[in-house]
Amino acid sequence: MKFLPVWIFSCFFLTACVGDRSDLELFVTTTKAQHVAHIPPLKAPPKFEHFAYQAQLMRSPFVPPSRELTEEVLGQRTDCLQPDLKRHKGKLETYALDNLKMRGTLSEANLIWALIETSDGSVYRMGNGDYLGLYQGRITKVTPQNVEIIELIPDGSGCWSERTSSMELTGE
């Protein structure tokens, strides 16, 4: 019964909207006739100048270099520290270390594994000797509080240098 006054009130306003609209239609037509929009003409397009492409034999800059080309450049020098480029990469080697978090540990007898969470929420069990990160990061030590990692960083001349990193246990 509470809706009855609201219903009667809305019907009254709807009937008030119906009526003679001839004055409104006359105003719209006269306004459209008097006010013509002036659109300036378009500028002439610039003259086309042909450019002769001279780099057909080089790699296209719009295509990333193939893995084989990258490995050739990296493997040219053998008298210094080099990563094993033929090694099969693990799932966590596609993530930067900043995108990985240590969430806990598992242990059995003398073995201890770290639980590493990726940015997409997946959790992996990693132990000594496992690889993670973008720079050939190898886990050297797992403790209940952190994971120690040695990464191989390219120096630009074909050699690599070792860098130690660590990942602390986060309780977020």
Image (tube, rainbow, N blue to C red):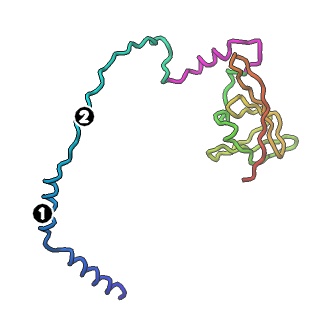
Quarter of the figure with residue 148: top right
How far apart marks 1 and 2 lie (CA) works out to 34 Å
Q: Residues within 10 Å of mark 2 (few under 14, many from 20)?
A: few
> Which residue position is annotated with label 2?
42
Q: Residue at x 76, y 23 (%)?
A: 161
In the figure, is residue 109 to the left or right of 38? right
Residue 152 percent coordinates (x, y): 74, 26
Q: Residue at x 77, y 41 (%)?
A: 167
Residue 30 percent coordinates (x, y): 13, 58
Residue 107 percent coordinates (x, y): 82, 45
Residue type beneath disc 2: Leu
**Could you tell me which secondary element the residue under label 1 belongs to?**
helix
Most frequent secondary structure within the magenta stretch: loop
Residue type beneath disc 1: Leu
Residue 27 percent coordinates (x, y): 15, 62
Image: 134 above or below 55: below
Residues at circles 1 and 2 in contact by the CB criterion of under 8 Å: no
Toward the viewer: 23 or 118?
A: 23
